[in-house]
Amino acid sequence: MSEIIIAKTSGFCFGVNRAVETVNNLLSQGKKVCTLGEIIHNSYVINDFEKKGVKVINSPSETPAGYTLVIRSHGCVKKDLEFIKKNNIDFVDATCPFVKKIHKIVEVNKENNQILLAAGNADHPEMIGIRSYFNNKSYVISGKKDLQKLINDGSISHKNLIIMISQTTFSKKEWENCTNLISNGFTNITIHDTICNTTNSRQEEAEKLSKTSDLMIVVGGEKSSNTRKLYEICKKNTDAILVESVKNLPLINYEKYTKIGIVAGASTPIKLVEQIKIFLEGWYYG
Ligand code: SF4
């Protein structure tokens, strides 16, 4: 029988837990709740909230009368927050404090020639929110290659004052590649390492565990950026599969693996991870 190890860092991170608990607390007070976008990237949690009457809306102007609007841990764009306040919409801001910190860093820019270099995924809601707080030109880089391209084509030069930040779930290794590259040629740059510690420790544990396991199961939502990163780290070192829950687990012969590691993204309830372990144990017991 294989040894099955669940990573110690599995389960909700602080920011996700805070957002989910915000919704739970409002529901327990008898309030009607809607969220600006899905509260977290996990369909299990979304479906559960839907059954409890929580509505997902795409713009604060869609807030139904009598509802309390919750801003999720990724945060929202600046103009949405301004709209909410201006129109006295009842709301709770569950933006993770680590994301809020990045909003504050990029919002202080006053100089016209300042540009923002943001490491991460341009389409991710957290990144869209961050960029909305910056007044001047901003570039998103997914890694060292993108940065090299911007340097080569002159998009960033010594004339600019550069602020560099990262999405909270960006890969630590890729961040170091980027900061090493830019620090070599540019002195006109302020670098803020804004990768969340939770993300760091999850990635480090995934790296370690995947080096000693012959199969890694990564549990998390399709849209979850930090889950994808964990999967990429694991599959470099060993066989890896990415599933949202036990229901998506492929029916392969798990007995051939000596050690199976399980890691989970920051928006994965620990219950889903434990169900996978139970399934695997049941598999062996027949
Ligand atoms: S991963 Fe970090 S920054 Fe993102 S919600 Fe969780 S605690 Fe906050």
Image: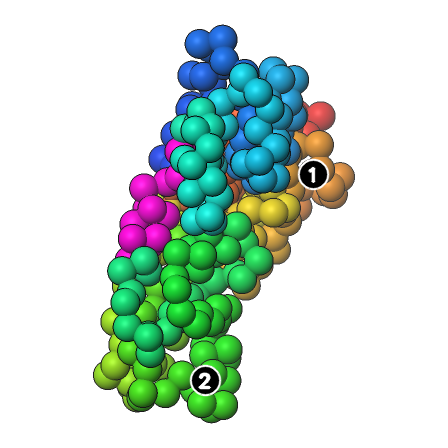
- Does ligand 1 reach within 8 Å of label 1's beta carbon? no
Q: Which residues are magenta?
A: 93-105
Identify the image quadrant of the N terminus: top right
Q: Residue at x 36, y 48 (%)?
A: 99
Instruction: Find ligand 1 in the image and state its quadrant.
Output: top left
Q: Residue at x 45, y 84 (%)?
A: 155
Q: Residue 19: within the magenta?
A: no
Judged by depth in the image, the label closer to the viewer, 2 or 1, is 2
Camera-nearest residue between 20 and 176: 20
Q: Residue at x 57, y 58 (%)?
A: 123
Q: Is residue 2 left or right of residue 169?
A: right
Element assignment for label 2: loop
Find residue 249 and name its label. Answer: 1
Cα separation, mark 2 vs mark 1, equals 45 Å
Using a 10 Å C-alpha cutoff, classify the residue at mark 1 as few (fewer than 14 neighbours), some (14 to 19) or many (20 or more): some
Percent of width and height locating residue 11 = 45, 34
Camera-nearest residue between 22 and 213: 22
Q: Amino acid at mark 1?
A: Leu
Percent of width and height locating residue 80 = 48, 43
* Rendered image quadrant of residue 251: top right
Camera-nearest residue between 121 and 109: 109
Identify the image quadrant of the C terminus: top right
Camera-nearest residue between 86 and 275: 86
Q: Amino acid at mark 2?
A: Ser
Q: Is residue 207 left or right of residue 47?
A: left
Element assignment for label 1: loop
